[in-house]
Image (tube, rainbow, N blue to C red):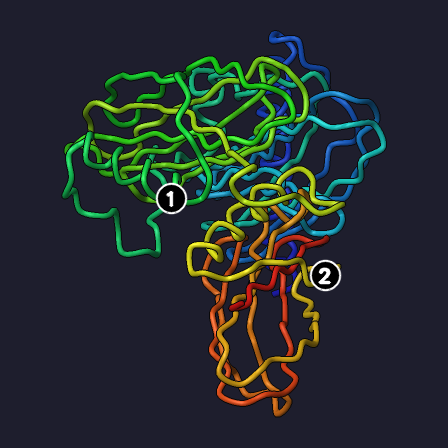
Amino acid sequence: MRAAAWLALCSLCASTAAADDTLRACVDEAAQAMEARGARRVGETVVGFLREGEARSVPFTLEEAGCVGVLAVGHRRVHDLDLVLQTDSGMTLAEDVEVDARPYLRFCGAAGLRLVATVQMYKGRGEFRLVRFADAPATLPDLHRTLGGCFAGGGGMRRASADVGPAPPGRALPERLARLDGDLGDLGYRALGLERSGSLSAPQREAHPLSLEAGRCYAVVAVGDLGVADLDVSIRTAAGRELARDVARDAAAVTRLCVGAAEPLVAEVRMFQGSGAYRLRVMALDERRTGERPPGVEGFARIGHAELRARMTARGMAARPLGWGLIGPGQALGMPVELEAGKCYAFGGAPADEVQAGDLDLILVDEDEALLAWDVGPGNVPLVWHCAERSGAVRVVGRVYGAAGRYLVLMGEQP
Protein backbone atom coordinates (compact mmCIF):
# COMPACT_ATOMS: atom_id res chain seq x y z
CA MET A 1 0.00 0.00 0.00
CA ARG A 2 2.69 2.43 1.05
CA ALA A 3 4.82 1.58 -2.01
CA ALA A 4 1.84 2.01 -4.34
CA ALA A 5 1.08 5.41 -2.83
CA TRP A 6 4.68 6.51 -3.32
CA LEU A 7 4.61 5.32 -6.93
CA ALA A 8 1.41 7.28 -7.59
CA LEU A 9 2.89 10.37 -5.97
CA CYS A 10 6.09 10.09 -8.01
CA SER A 11 4.03 9.69 -11.18
CA LEU A 12 2.08 12.86 -10.35
CA CYS A 13 5.32 14.74 -9.66
CA ALA A 14 6.80 13.63 -12.97
CA SER A 15 3.63 14.62 -14.81
CA THR A 16 3.63 18.06 -13.15
CA ALA A 17 7.30 18.60 -13.96
CA ALA A 18 6.73 17.63 -17.59
CA ALA A 19 3.76 19.96 -17.82
CA ASP A 20 5.81 22.78 -16.31
CA ASP A 21 8.63 22.23 -18.83
CA THR A 22 6.21 22.17 -21.75
CA LEU A 23 4.45 25.32 -20.60
CA ARG A 24 7.75 27.11 -20.04
CA ALA A 25 8.82 26.21 -23.59
CA CYS A 26 5.50 27.52 -24.94
CA VAL A 27 5.90 30.83 -23.13
CA ASP A 28 9.51 31.16 -24.29
CA GLU A 29 8.48 30.62 -27.92
CA ALA A 30 5.68 33.15 -27.56
CA ALA A 31 8.16 35.64 -26.08
CA GLN A 32 10.50 35.14 -29.03
CA ALA A 33 7.65 35.84 -31.46
CA MET A 34 6.81 39.03 -29.52
CA GLU A 35 10.44 40.17 -29.40
CA ALA A 36 10.66 39.69 -33.17
CA ARG A 37 8.01 42.43 -33.41
CA GLY A 38 9.96 44.82 -31.18
CA ALA A 39 8.46 43.99 -27.78
CA ARG A 40 10.52 43.55 -24.58
CA ARG A 41 9.72 41.08 -21.82
CA VAL A 42 9.41 42.88 -18.45
CA GLY A 43 8.64 41.90 -14.87
CA GLU A 44 8.43 38.43 -13.39
CA THR A 45 6.52 35.56 -14.95
CA VAL A 46 3.52 34.59 -12.83
CA VAL A 47 2.86 30.84 -12.56
CA GLY A 48 -0.42 29.45 -11.21
CA PHE A 49 -2.97 26.65 -11.27
CA LEU A 50 -6.72 27.19 -11.74
CA ARG A 51 -9.80 25.00 -11.79
CA GLU A 52 -12.89 25.77 -13.84
CA GLY A 53 -14.58 28.93 -12.56
CA GLU A 54 -11.57 30.08 -10.52
CA ALA A 55 -9.67 33.33 -11.12
CA ARG A 56 -6.45 34.95 -10.00
CA SER A 57 -5.63 38.66 -9.94
CA VAL A 58 -2.08 39.96 -10.40
CA PRO A 59 -1.37 43.63 -9.53
CA PHE A 60 1.49 45.47 -11.20
CA THR A 61 2.68 49.00 -11.98
CA LEU A 62 3.69 50.39 -15.37
CA GLU A 63 7.45 50.83 -15.10
CA GLU A 64 7.53 53.27 -18.01
CA ALA A 65 5.14 55.24 -20.19
CA GLY A 66 3.99 53.38 -23.27
CA CYS A 67 2.07 50.28 -24.29
CA VAL A 68 2.14 47.15 -22.14
CA GLY A 69 1.05 43.78 -23.48
CA VAL A 70 -0.23 41.07 -21.15
CA LEU A 71 -0.25 37.43 -22.30
CA ALA A 72 -1.65 34.44 -20.43
CA VAL A 73 -0.84 30.92 -21.66
CA GLY A 74 -2.56 27.78 -20.41
CA HIS A 75 -1.49 24.14 -20.71
CA ARG A 76 -3.20 21.42 -22.76
CA ARG A 77 -5.89 20.79 -20.15
CA VAL A 78 -6.88 24.46 -20.40
CA HIS A 79 -9.49 24.98 -23.11
CA ASP A 80 -10.72 28.51 -22.46
CA LEU A 81 -8.82 31.16 -20.50
CA ASP A 82 -10.02 34.76 -20.10
CA LEU A 83 -7.95 37.85 -19.33
CA VAL A 84 -9.17 41.22 -18.02
CA LEU A 85 -7.11 44.36 -17.30
CA GLN A 86 -8.43 46.88 -14.77
CA THR A 87 -7.25 49.85 -12.75
CA ASP A 88 -6.72 49.27 -9.03
CA SER A 89 -10.11 50.98 -8.50
CA GLY A 90 -11.90 48.36 -10.61
CA MET A 91 -12.43 50.15 -13.94
CA THR A 92 -12.06 47.75 -16.87
CA LEU A 93 -9.53 48.94 -19.47
CA ALA A 94 -9.28 45.94 -21.80
CA GLU A 95 -10.37 42.31 -21.97
CA ASP A 96 -9.92 39.18 -24.07
CA VAL A 97 -12.78 36.71 -23.65
CA GLU A 98 -12.43 34.86 -26.94
CA VAL A 99 -12.48 31.06 -26.77
CA ASP A 100 -8.81 30.07 -26.56
CA ALA A 101 -6.07 29.26 -24.05
CA ARG A 102 -3.76 32.19 -24.88
CA PRO A 103 -5.59 35.50 -24.25
CA TYR A 104 -3.68 38.69 -24.99
CA LEU A 105 -4.46 42.36 -24.47
CA ARG A 106 -2.66 45.69 -24.68
CA PHE A 107 -3.03 49.00 -22.87
CA CYS A 108 -1.14 52.28 -23.30
CA GLY A 109 -0.69 54.52 -20.27
CA ALA A 110 1.59 56.72 -18.20
CA ALA A 111 4.43 55.51 -15.98
CA GLY A 112 3.43 54.67 -12.42
CA LEU A 113 -0.13 53.63 -13.28
CA ARG A 114 -1.27 50.79 -11.01
CA LEU A 115 -3.08 47.99 -12.85
CA VAL A 116 -4.55 44.58 -12.10
CA ALA A 117 -4.56 41.65 -14.56
CA THR A 118 -7.12 38.93 -13.78
CA VAL A 119 -6.88 35.45 -15.29
CA GLN A 120 -10.07 33.35 -15.19
CA MET A 121 -10.44 29.68 -16.07
CA TYR A 122 -13.66 29.49 -18.11
CA LYS A 123 -13.27 25.88 -19.26
CA GLY A 124 -10.75 23.25 -18.20
CA ARG A 125 -8.20 23.11 -15.40
CA GLY A 126 -4.44 23.29 -15.21
CA GLU A 127 -1.41 25.52 -15.09
CA PHE A 128 -1.05 28.95 -16.63
CA ARG A 129 1.71 31.52 -17.01
CA LEU A 130 1.26 35.30 -17.19
CA VAL A 131 3.93 37.45 -18.86
CA ARG A 132 4.18 41.15 -19.66
CA PHE A 133 5.84 42.99 -22.54
CA ALA A 134 6.84 46.62 -23.00
CA ASP A 135 6.51 48.27 -26.45
CA ALA A 136 3.86 45.66 -27.16
CA PRO A 137 2.18 45.28 -30.56
CA ALA A 138 -1.57 45.83 -30.89
CA THR A 139 -2.25 42.18 -31.73
CA LEU A 140 -0.66 38.89 -30.80
CA PRO A 141 1.59 37.33 -33.48
CA ASP A 142 0.36 34.15 -35.14
CA LEU A 143 1.37 31.39 -32.74
CA HIS A 144 -0.49 28.47 -34.31
CA ARG A 145 2.48 27.05 -36.21
CA THR A 146 5.03 27.22 -33.41
CA LEU A 147 2.74 26.50 -30.45
CA GLY A 148 0.16 24.18 -31.98
CA GLY A 149 0.97 21.32 -29.61
CA CYS A 150 1.28 23.38 -26.45
CA PHE A 151 -2.36 23.82 -25.56
CA ALA A 152 -5.89 22.86 -26.52
CA GLY A 153 -7.56 24.91 -29.20
CA GLY A 154 -10.74 26.80 -28.54
CA GLY A 155 -12.37 26.05 -31.85
CA GLY A 156 -11.87 29.57 -33.23
CA MET A 157 -15.34 30.74 -32.17
CA ARG A 158 -16.59 33.46 -29.85
CA ARG A 159 -18.26 32.16 -26.69
CA ALA A 160 -22.02 31.88 -26.98
CA SER A 161 -23.71 35.07 -25.82
CA ALA A 162 -26.38 35.07 -23.13
CA ASP A 163 -28.57 37.52 -25.02
CA VAL A 164 -31.35 36.67 -27.43
CA GLY A 165 -29.36 37.27 -30.60
CA PRO A 166 -29.07 40.01 -33.19
CA ALA A 167 -31.90 42.30 -34.08
CA PRO A 168 -33.80 41.00 -37.12
CA PRO A 169 -33.12 42.95 -40.30
CA GLY A 170 -36.02 45.17 -41.18
CA ARG A 171 -34.81 48.39 -42.78
CA ALA A 172 -32.50 49.04 -45.69
CA LEU A 173 -29.36 51.13 -45.28
CA PRO A 174 -30.83 54.52 -46.30
CA GLU A 175 -33.76 54.07 -43.90
CA ARG A 176 -31.48 53.10 -41.03
CA LEU A 177 -29.24 56.09 -41.67
CA ALA A 178 -32.20 58.47 -41.81
CA ARG A 179 -33.54 57.12 -38.51
CA LEU A 180 -30.16 57.49 -36.78
CA ASP A 181 -29.71 60.98 -38.20
CA GLY A 182 -33.06 61.94 -36.73
CA ASP A 183 -32.38 60.39 -33.32
CA LEU A 184 -28.94 62.00 -33.02
CA GLY A 185 -30.20 65.28 -34.46
CA ASP A 186 -32.68 65.49 -31.58
CA LEU A 187 -29.68 65.30 -29.21
CA GLY A 188 -27.81 68.19 -30.84
CA TYR A 189 -25.65 66.33 -33.40
CA ARG A 190 -25.24 67.49 -36.99
CA ALA A 191 -23.75 65.53 -39.87
CA LEU A 192 -20.33 66.51 -41.23
CA GLY A 193 -18.92 65.78 -44.64
CA LEU A 194 -16.88 62.87 -43.24
CA GLU A 195 -18.49 59.77 -44.72
CA ARG A 196 -17.07 56.41 -45.83
CA SER A 197 -18.63 53.30 -47.34
CA GLY A 198 -17.59 49.71 -47.87
CA SER A 199 -18.70 46.09 -47.98
CA LEU A 200 -17.66 43.27 -45.63
CA SER A 201 -18.39 39.65 -44.80
CA ALA A 202 -17.98 38.21 -41.31
CA PRO A 203 -15.38 38.24 -39.75
CA GLN A 204 -13.70 40.86 -41.96
CA ARG A 205 -12.58 44.28 -40.68
CA GLU A 206 -11.80 47.57 -42.37
CA ALA A 207 -10.05 50.65 -41.00
CA HIS A 208 -10.84 54.25 -41.95
CA PRO A 209 -8.65 57.23 -40.97
CA LEU A 210 -10.42 60.08 -39.17
CA SER A 211 -9.45 63.71 -38.81
CA LEU A 212 -11.39 65.17 -35.89
CA GLU A 213 -11.01 68.62 -34.39
CA ALA A 214 -9.55 68.91 -30.88
CA GLY A 215 -11.89 70.18 -28.20
CA ARG A 216 -15.09 68.92 -29.86
CA CYS A 217 -17.38 65.93 -29.29
CA TYR A 218 -18.54 63.53 -31.99
CA ALA A 219 -20.68 60.52 -32.79
CA VAL A 220 -19.14 58.06 -35.25
CA VAL A 221 -21.94 55.98 -36.76
CA ALA A 222 -21.72 52.79 -38.84
CA VAL A 223 -24.88 51.35 -40.41
CA GLY A 224 -25.21 48.08 -42.32
CA ASP A 225 -27.59 47.04 -45.10
CA LEU A 226 -30.24 44.29 -45.00
CA GLY A 227 -27.75 41.40 -44.97
CA VAL A 228 -25.85 42.81 -41.99
CA ALA A 229 -26.88 41.35 -38.62
CA ASP A 230 -24.09 42.54 -36.30
CA LEU A 231 -21.72 45.44 -37.03
CA ASP A 232 -19.13 46.71 -34.52
CA VAL A 233 -17.07 49.93 -34.48
CA SER A 234 -13.96 50.84 -32.49
CA ILE A 235 -12.20 54.24 -32.45
CA ARG A 236 -8.45 54.05 -31.78
CA THR A 237 -5.39 56.25 -31.85
CA ALA A 238 -2.59 55.55 -34.31
CA ALA A 239 -0.74 53.83 -31.43
CA GLY A 240 -3.65 51.42 -30.95
CA ARG A 241 -5.20 52.88 -27.78
CA GLU A 242 -8.97 52.44 -27.84
CA LEU A 243 -10.99 55.60 -27.18
CA ALA A 244 -14.56 54.38 -27.79
CA ARG A 245 -16.40 51.35 -29.11
CA ASP A 246 -19.85 49.92 -29.77
CA VAL A 247 -19.99 46.12 -29.88
CA ALA A 248 -23.73 45.68 -29.26
CA ARG A 249 -25.46 42.98 -31.31
CA ASP A 250 -27.03 45.27 -33.87
CA ALA A 251 -26.69 46.26 -37.50
CA ALA A 252 -25.97 49.85 -36.46
CA ALA A 253 -23.17 51.00 -34.15
CA VAL A 254 -22.81 54.43 -32.54
CA THR A 255 -19.60 55.48 -30.77
CA ARG A 256 -19.33 58.81 -28.95
CA LEU A 257 -16.17 60.63 -27.91
CA CYS A 258 -14.70 64.05 -27.13
CA VAL A 259 -11.33 64.71 -28.74
CA GLY A 260 -8.77 66.14 -26.32
CA ALA A 261 -5.85 66.66 -28.70
CA ALA A 262 -5.43 66.82 -32.45
CA GLU A 263 -4.02 63.41 -33.44
CA PRO A 264 -4.66 60.86 -36.19
CA LEU A 265 -7.51 58.50 -35.31
CA VAL A 266 -8.77 55.31 -36.91
CA ALA A 267 -12.32 53.94 -37.05
CA GLU A 268 -12.27 50.15 -37.34
CA VAL A 269 -15.47 48.60 -38.70
CA ARG A 270 -15.90 44.88 -38.00
CA MET A 271 -18.53 42.62 -39.50
CA PHE A 272 -19.29 40.14 -36.73
CA GLN A 273 -22.35 38.50 -38.28
CA GLY A 274 -23.74 38.73 -41.79
CA SER A 275 -22.43 40.44 -44.90
CA GLY A 276 -23.21 43.42 -47.05
CA ALA A 277 -22.64 47.11 -47.60
CA TYR A 278 -22.17 49.59 -44.77
CA ARG A 279 -21.77 53.33 -44.40
CA LEU A 280 -19.66 55.18 -41.83
CA ARG A 281 -20.70 58.73 -40.90
CA VAL A 282 -19.26 61.34 -38.50
CA MET A 283 -21.58 63.75 -36.66
CA ALA A 284 -20.48 66.63 -34.43
CA LEU A 285 -22.23 67.58 -31.20
CA ASP A 286 -23.59 71.13 -31.46
CA GLU A 287 -23.50 72.19 -27.81
CA ARG A 288 -24.92 75.62 -28.63
CA ARG A 289 -28.32 74.00 -29.09
CA THR A 290 -28.28 72.43 -25.62
CA GLY A 291 -27.41 75.40 -23.39
CA GLU A 292 -24.27 76.53 -21.63
CA ARG A 293 -21.94 74.00 -20.08
CA PRO A 294 -21.51 74.38 -16.29
CA PRO A 295 -18.01 74.43 -14.70
CA GLY A 296 -16.36 71.04 -14.34
CA VAL A 297 -18.19 69.40 -17.24
CA GLU A 298 -15.36 68.21 -19.46
CA GLY A 299 -14.47 65.13 -21.48
CA PHE A 300 -17.13 62.44 -21.70
CA ALA A 301 -19.38 64.31 -19.24
CA ARG A 302 -19.87 66.94 -21.99
CA ILE A 303 -21.62 64.34 -24.14
CA GLY A 304 -23.94 63.16 -21.39
CA HIS A 305 -24.67 66.73 -20.28
CA ALA A 306 -25.58 67.93 -23.77
CA GLU A 307 -27.65 64.86 -24.64
CA LEU A 308 -29.58 64.92 -21.35
CA ARG A 309 -30.37 68.63 -21.71
CA ALA A 310 -31.61 68.04 -25.25
CA ARG A 311 -33.94 65.23 -24.13
CA MET A 312 -35.30 67.28 -21.24
CA THR A 313 -35.78 70.37 -23.40
CA ALA A 314 -37.69 68.29 -25.96
CA ARG A 315 -40.27 67.61 -23.24
CA GLY A 316 -40.56 71.27 -22.35
CA MET A 317 -38.42 71.10 -19.20
CA ALA A 318 -35.86 73.60 -17.95
CA ALA A 319 -32.66 71.66 -17.11
CA ARG A 320 -30.12 72.59 -14.45
CA PRO A 321 -27.28 70.78 -12.65
CA LEU A 322 -28.32 69.30 -9.31
CA GLY A 323 -24.82 68.35 -8.13
CA TRP A 324 -21.84 66.05 -8.54
CA GLY A 325 -21.58 62.59 -7.00
CA LEU A 326 -18.44 60.58 -6.23
CA ILE A 327 -18.78 56.86 -5.57
CA GLY A 328 -16.86 53.59 -5.86
CA PRO A 329 -17.83 50.37 -7.68
CA GLY A 330 -21.17 49.04 -6.43
CA GLN A 331 -21.64 51.87 -3.95
CA ALA A 332 -24.76 54.08 -3.80
CA LEU A 333 -25.13 57.81 -3.20
CA GLY A 334 -28.38 59.68 -2.62
CA MET A 335 -29.07 63.35 -3.37
CA PRO A 336 -32.10 64.96 -1.66
CA VAL A 337 -34.48 67.20 -3.60
CA GLU A 338 -37.91 68.74 -2.97
CA LEU A 339 -40.70 68.09 -5.46
CA GLU A 340 -43.98 69.94 -5.93
CA ALA A 341 -47.26 68.09 -6.39
CA GLY A 342 -48.68 68.20 -9.91
CA LYS A 343 -45.37 68.95 -11.65
CA CYS A 344 -43.24 66.59 -13.75
CA TYR A 345 -39.49 66.16 -13.42
CA ALA A 346 -36.53 64.45 -15.05
CA PHE A 347 -33.23 63.34 -13.51
CA GLY A 348 -30.23 62.27 -15.56
CA GLY A 349 -26.65 61.21 -14.88
CA ALA A 350 -23.69 62.45 -16.95
CA PRO A 351 -20.59 60.34 -16.13
CA ALA A 352 -17.06 61.73 -16.07
CA ASP A 353 -14.26 60.06 -18.03
CA GLU A 354 -13.39 57.55 -15.30
CA VAL A 355 -16.98 56.25 -15.23
CA GLN A 356 -17.33 56.04 -19.02
CA ALA A 357 -16.46 52.33 -19.13
CA GLY A 358 -18.83 51.46 -16.27
CA ASP A 359 -22.59 51.16 -15.86
CA LEU A 360 -24.26 54.14 -14.14
CA ASP A 361 -27.79 53.61 -12.78
CA LEU A 362 -30.25 56.10 -11.28
CA ILE A 363 -33.34 55.47 -9.16
CA LEU A 364 -35.79 57.85 -7.48
CA VAL A 365 -37.14 56.97 -4.00
CA ASP A 366 -39.43 58.81 -1.59
CA GLU A 367 -38.98 59.38 2.16
CA ASP A 368 -40.24 55.85 2.87
CA GLU A 369 -37.70 54.35 0.41
CA ALA A 370 -40.52 53.45 -1.99
CA LEU A 371 -39.37 53.25 -5.60
CA LEU A 372 -40.77 56.04 -7.79
CA ALA A 373 -38.74 55.79 -11.02
CA TRP A 374 -35.62 54.03 -12.24
CA ASP A 375 -33.15 53.53 -15.09
CA VAL A 376 -31.09 50.44 -14.26
CA GLY A 377 -30.49 49.01 -17.70
CA PRO A 378 -27.10 48.79 -19.44
CA GLY A 379 -25.50 52.11 -20.32
CA ASN A 380 -23.80 54.99 -18.60
CA VAL A 381 -26.14 57.98 -19.25
CA PRO A 382 -29.33 57.12 -17.31
CA LEU A 383 -32.48 59.25 -17.39
CA VAL A 384 -35.65 58.91 -15.28
CA TRP A 385 -39.01 60.72 -15.48
CA HIS A 386 -41.48 61.31 -12.67
CA CYS A 387 -44.68 63.33 -12.16
CA ALA A 388 -45.16 64.09 -8.46
CA GLU A 389 -48.55 63.28 -6.95
CA ARG A 390 -47.65 64.99 -3.67
CA SER A 391 -45.16 67.57 -2.48
CA GLY A 392 -42.20 66.45 -0.38
CA ALA A 393 -38.62 65.29 -0.28
CA VAL A 394 -37.26 62.51 -2.50
CA ARG A 395 -33.77 61.15 -3.14
CA VAL A 396 -31.97 60.60 -6.44
CA VAL A 397 -29.80 57.53 -5.84
CA GLY A 398 -26.86 56.80 -8.13
CA ARG A 399 -24.89 53.56 -8.34
CA VAL A 400 -21.91 52.66 -10.53
CA TYR A 401 -20.89 49.14 -11.58
CA GLY A 402 -17.47 48.26 -12.99
CA ALA A 403 -15.92 51.69 -12.36
CA ALA A 404 -15.41 54.39 -9.76
CA GLY A 405 -15.52 58.16 -10.04
CA ARG A 406 -17.69 61.23 -10.58
CA TYR A 407 -20.99 61.86 -12.27
CA LEU A 408 -23.19 64.94 -12.62
CA VAL A 409 -26.90 64.75 -11.86
CA LEU A 410 -29.09 67.02 -14.00
CA MET A 411 -32.62 67.97 -13.01
CA GLY A 412 -35.34 68.89 -15.46
CA GLU A 413 -38.46 70.69 -14.25
CA GLN A 414 -41.64 71.96 -15.83
CA PRO A 415 -41.66 75.78 -15.89
Quadrant holding the N terminus: bottom right
Coordinates of residue 253 in the picture (x, y in percent) = 36, 36
At 58% from the left edge and 54% from the top edge, which residue is drawn? 8
Question: Looking at this view, is 321 or 77 the one in front?
Answer: 321
Whichever of callouts 2 and 1 sits on the residue coming sooner in the sequence is 1
Disc 2, SS: strand
| Three-letter amino acid code of the residue under disc 2 | Gly
* Neighbour tally class for label 1: few under 14, some 14-19, many 20 plus, Cα within 10 Å: some
At 25% from the left edge and 35% from the top edge, which residue is drawn? 178
| Three-letter amino acid code of the residue under disc 1 | Ala
Residue 22 in view: no
Q: Is residue 282 left or right of residue 264?
A: left
* Neighbour tally class for label 2: few under 14, some 14-19, many 20 plus, Cα within 10 Å: few
Residue 99 in view: yes
Residue at which label 1 appears: 248
At 36% from the left edge and 40% from the top edge, which residue is drawn? 158
Disc 1, SS: loop
Q: Looking at the image, is 236 positioned above or below residue 59?
A: above
Residue at which label 2 appears: 323
Question: Looking at this view, is 320 or 13 the one in front?
Answer: 320
Q: Looking at the image, is 138 positioned above or below residue 303?
A: above
State the separation of the CA atoms marked 2 and 1. 31 Å
